[in-house]
Image (cartoon, helix red, strand yellow):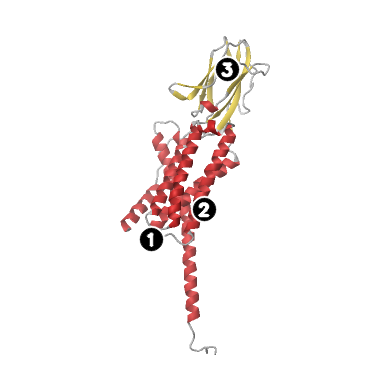
Amino acid sequence: MRSLRAVLLVAVLALAGVGVLASPADAHALLERSYPAAGTSLPRAPNVMLLYFTEAPEPSLSPVSLLDSSGQTVPGVGKPTVVPGNARELRVRLPPLADGVYTVSWRTVSKVDGHVTGGSFAFGIGVQPPPGAAVAPDGSPSTGSAPSPAAVAGLWLLYWGLALLAAAGVTGPLVFRWRLPGGARIVIAAGWLAAAAGILIMIFSERAAAGVPFGELFGAAAGRLLLAQAAAVAVCGLAAFDAARRPEGPGLVVLAAAAAGAMFVHALAGHAATQSSVRLLNVTDQWLHMLAAGVWIGGLVWLLLGFGTWTGRRGRRLSAASRSWRSPLWPSSP
């Protein structure tokens, strides 16, 4: 037992000392450039339009429409498809176009993190579009929407619920000699319920943001990543049930491993998973940071719970001792 506790202690210290070697990742699938480019004029009509994004978009959840100078939708525009060999580039087939100014309106869901972005820009054929026509106020043809309050709340519930479970499996062997303090069953149940509620809120929030049915959402990469996280939380539920039933022994290590695995699946659904030559390093780095912070903060909850249990027991012992002690100078009651 002591050797295993020493190994766990070394592992926790290693997590706390993780370096920052990972490369930065872009935020959201923003439109980086396009063909035709925003604000340009072409001498002849193209038969294809190309959209380049900073992250890989989900083509099935990325509608693109084309409006003419009167604001009417141009019929015959094809559905976006991924350009072979470049997951960040979408190709849209165009019908024959007459000379004039056209506005491209697009909306996409990032395949990396499920965030929704959108925007519009104008180009001309044979004529020059007005300056700044149909371009975002900041001058870029791209706007990102902030996650909804519900999505943020779901993310926090998921993470801190998993943090409580992971910390239970670490502080149990290292601090409490393989037996969690009183009240552990309630805290374990609360941690798992928070994580389960968090992933459900995230799923419903993503469906509302994407504006598609659940079947279509789960057929896309972003939806499949949410399902993977839900499955990981379900596995944590089994480990949490066993640990709550008997909050001692090797079941605590199983609980920590399940929570750590769920955090890893969550890291795979974030910006760290963006295609890169060091993608595995990015994901591992983010996962280790999440795990270290979760064990650190979640461990404080367990330490406070253990301190409360210890002080309560000590107070009861002192109270019992004071009642049993009688001063020889004080006469006993008849």
Q: Which comes sooner in the sequence, label 2 or label 1? A: 1
Mark 1, Cα crowd under 10 Å, few <14 / some 14-19 / many 20+, is some
Q: Is residue 270 something one can see in this rendering?
A: no
Question: Which mark is in front, 2 or 1?
Answer: 2
Q: Cα distance, mark 1 to mark 3?
A: 66 Å
In which image quadrant can residue 103 be found? top right
Residue type pointed to by label 3: Val
Three-letter residue code for mark 1: Arg
- Mark 3 residue element: loop
| Residue 8 x, y percent position in the rendering | 36, 52
Residue 190, numbered label: 2
Q: Decide if residue 236 is in sight here.
A: yes
Q: Which residue is mark 3?
A: 77
Do residues under tags 1 and 3 come within 8 Å of each other at their CB atoms?
no
Q: Characterize the local packing of mark 3: few (<14), some (14-19) or many (20 or more) Cα atoms within 10 angstroms.
A: some
Report how far apart the C-alphas of labels 3 and 2 lie in the structure. 51 Å
**Where does residue 189 sit, x and y in percent of width and height?**
50, 53
Residue at the (57%, 38%) spot, across then down: 205
Q: Residue at x 40, y 45 (%)?
A: 18
Residue located 58% across and 20% down the image: 38
Mark carried by residue 177: 1
The residue at 57%/39% (across/down) is: 204
Circle 1 SS class: loop
* Quadrant (top left/top right/bottom left/bottom right) for the N terminus: bottom left
Label 2 and label 1: CA atoms lie apart by 23 Å
Total count of labels: 3
Up-down relation of residue 65 to residue 245 (above or below): above
